[in-house]
């Protein structure tokens, strides 16, 4: 009886070790993802799992791709200048990633920084994103700036804000297209919040998990197509 129990214990231990090794191997083989940005990237005012980088990861993992939890370099209020500075001080600065997203510029507009400065700094941070992707431009995804002018926070200056957001987006789209990276326009989705309050978080300014989910419906298919078979 003791011999049988010992044998069962040995078999159980081997099976457990194999399962743990397989899990470790799967995680090691999973794609890496870096998200660069500001409050729209960290998901200000919603749970972390409802932010678009985490929703994107969840959706990709439901398909044929396995993706680790995203590494995120983003903070509420950051301009392109502040993102660039933070990247230079980050531990990730010398790492490479299989997938990189970039969404930056709303605070440049909000603080009244010049569009000329944004042109220069957006190009710089986009080049940094491409470098993070190991030079693989097809794995870099730029998202347009949402229009917060339709939110309760921004409604007093809705027209002015909307017009300026369009101008900043024209800049980041032009630079993105010239660099041959992927570009996703989510500004139209953000403007639906004018008639759908469920698209706005409780703070009256930032997107809700529902809106981020709408972004990811478009982003996930784009990313999955570019990642191909892994």
Image (spheres, grey):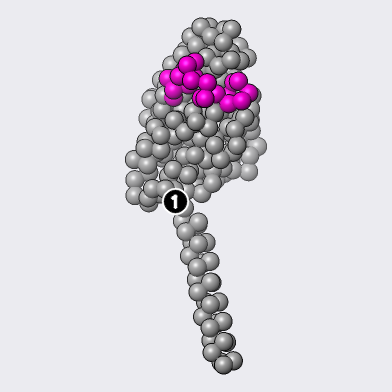
Residue 22 percent location from the top left of the image? 48, 65
Q: Which residue is depicted at the point 54% across and 72% down?
A: 17
Query: In the rendering, at what x and y percent does residue 85 appear?
Result: 63, 30
Which residue position is annotated with label 1?
A: 66
Residue 190 seen by the camera: yes
Image quadrant in which you'd find residue 105: top right
In the rendered view, would you say 144 is above or below 101? above
Q: Please, is residue 52 above or below residue 144 in the view?
A: below
Residue 196 part of the magenta-drawn span: yes
Q: Is residue 159 above or below residue 176?
A: above
Circle 1: element type: loop
Along the line of sight, which residue is nearer the eye, 110 or 123? 110
Which residue is pictured at 58% across the width and 15% down the height?
Answer: 152
- Is 131 magenta? The answer is no
Q: Quadrant of the N terminus?
A: bottom right
| Relative image position of residue 54 (x, y in whole percent) | 52, 40
Examine the image and state in which quarter residue 86 appears.
top right
Say which residue appears at 45% left-offset and 19% top-offset.
192
Give me the residue at 54% from left, 28% from top.
208
Q: Is residue 105 visible?
A: no
Q: Residues within 10 Å of mark 1 (few under 14, many from 20)?
A: many
Question: Relative to the observer, which residue lies in front, 12 or 187?
Answer: 12
Q: Which span of residues is magenta-colored?
A: 186-206
Q: Position of residue 212 (x, y in %)?
A: 49, 31
Q: Nearer the viewer, residue 215 or 181?
A: 215
Q: In the rendered view, would you say 85 is above or below 119?
A: below
Answer left or right for 34 relative to 138: right
Q: How many marks?
A: 1
């Amino acid at each position: 009886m003791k011999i049988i129990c010992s044998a069962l214990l040995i078999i159980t231990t081997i099976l457990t070790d194999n399962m743990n090794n397989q899990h470790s191997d799967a995680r090691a083989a999973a794609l890496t993802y870096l998200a660069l940005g500001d409050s729209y990237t960290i998901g200000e005012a919603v749970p972390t799992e409802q932010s678009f980088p985490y929703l994107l990861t969840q959706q990709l993992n439901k398909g044929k791709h396995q993706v680790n939890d995203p590494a995120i370099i983003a903070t509420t209020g950051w301009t392109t200048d502040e993102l660039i500075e933070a990247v230079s001080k980050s531990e990730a600065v010398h790492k490479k990633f299989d997938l990189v997203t970039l969404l930056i510029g709303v605070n440049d507009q909000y603080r009244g920084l010049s569009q000329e400065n944004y042109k220069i700094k957006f190009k710089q941070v986009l080049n940094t994103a491409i470098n993070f992707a190991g030079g693989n431009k097809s794995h870099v995804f730029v998202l347009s700036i949402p229009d917060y002018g339709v939110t309760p926070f921004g409604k007093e200056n809705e027209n002015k804000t909307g017009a300026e957001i369009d101008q900043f987006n024209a800049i980041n789209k032009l630079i993105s297209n010239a660099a041959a990276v992927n570009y996703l326009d989510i500004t139209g989705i953000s403007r639906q919040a004018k008639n759908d309050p469920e698209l706005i978080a409780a703070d009256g300014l930032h997107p809700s998990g529902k809106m981020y989910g709408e972004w990811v419906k478009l982003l996930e298919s784009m990313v999955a197509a570019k990642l191909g078979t892994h």
